[in-house]
Image (tube, rainbow, N blue to C red):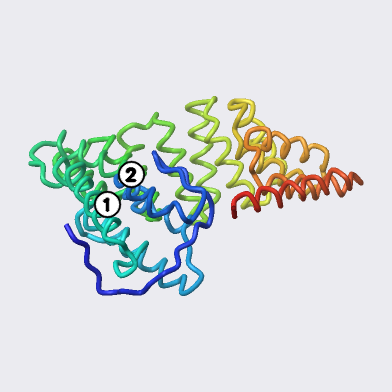
Amino acid sequence: MESTTNNNTSYNVLLEKPIKYGKINISLSSQLLDEFIKFPVDSLKFVLSGRARGFLKTDDPEKLFIKRLKKIESSEETPSKKYAEFMELLSPSENRTEEYKKAINDAIDIVYKSLEQKIYDAPILSIKDYFENAFKKFDLGDLKGAIGDYSKVIEKDDKNVSAYYNRGIARQNLGNNAGAIADFAKVIELKPDYAPAYNNRGVAKRKVEDYDSAISDFNKAIELDSKYAAAFYNRALAKKNLRDVVGVIEDFSVAIDLKPNFIDAYFNRGLELKAINEYKSAIDDFSKVIELDSLDVAAYINRAFCREQLGDYAGGRNDKKKVEEIKNSKQE
């Protein structure tokens, strides 16, 4: 199966940051083509999830490259066609050896046999079939396809809570927050005691800057489940938008108590403590982040600032030195 495209623009594709996705593990730009050929299904999932845009870049013209990536993500083409277009974008055909051409075509066949025959060519007859296909498409990063199948489930069963909830998650991941809010509202109507629906609707409301209403949803989620760490964390983010510093720190702290390795909560609480000049406590939080992820550049940068504010210039220099070491190791 040969890939075709109308745009033969040649890109010098670079690695923005190391990629770990499924079986794919890439630390150098020179590994890109080999890894995406070696693991074609994971490669396709990576592209359709939208993550490729945050990991791959070009020196010039980057905007056009990203535009083509987005076009592949939203394309109505079959999975193998999308994969082929991505591989052609990554390595234009005129630059490929015969060996690479054969390897790419073999990988395209793997995508076809693994995905299209199982999902797109399968007879779709029942609610169960639609639901299973939607779940598979979601897992592959084909969010539009998943939404379509969940919608078919809802057409056949307009009280299917799982279909509304999962469609809401897919819509949320696509940035369709209004659609997500409507789906989570339907879940709440059908199952009023389901805390995750309130939490996720709150997240979507915060994205559209409806902060007070978002907090009300997080409050309800916490009322239904007092150990819901994610709801406390999300409520803290909403309170931050309303400049409720005390409330923000309190909620991040509860989230950490409930989930001791909640790295995002430590980092964001550290930022809040730093903002109110509580540098010692902020250092403790950034140190915990580093304990959980020794390559977190942002944590080192913020800890360095806090250390310097307390007069620990040697500690600040050490943190800055670590930042440079991490950045240099990623470029090797």
Confirm whether residue 205 shows in the render: yes
Q: Quadrant of residue 268?
A: top right
Q: Position of residue 63 (x, y in %)?
A: 45, 71
Type of the residue with mark 1: Ala
Which residue is at a point 71% across and 46% down the rendered structure image?
Answer: 271
Q: Going by the image, does 28 lie left or right of 157? A: right
The residue lying toward the viewer, choosing from 302 and 268, is 302
Q: Position of residue 70 (x, y in %)?
A: 36, 63
Label 1: element kind: helix
Disc 1: CA contacts within 10 A as few (<14), some (14-19) or many (>=20): some
Name the residue beneath numbered marker 1.
Answer: 103
Q: Position of residue 41 (x, y in %)?
A: 29, 45
Q: Going by the image, does 192 lie left or right of 320? A: left
Name the residue beneath numbered marker 2.
Answer: 39
Q: Quadrant of residue 197?
A: top left
- Nearer mark to the viewer, of 2 and 1: 1
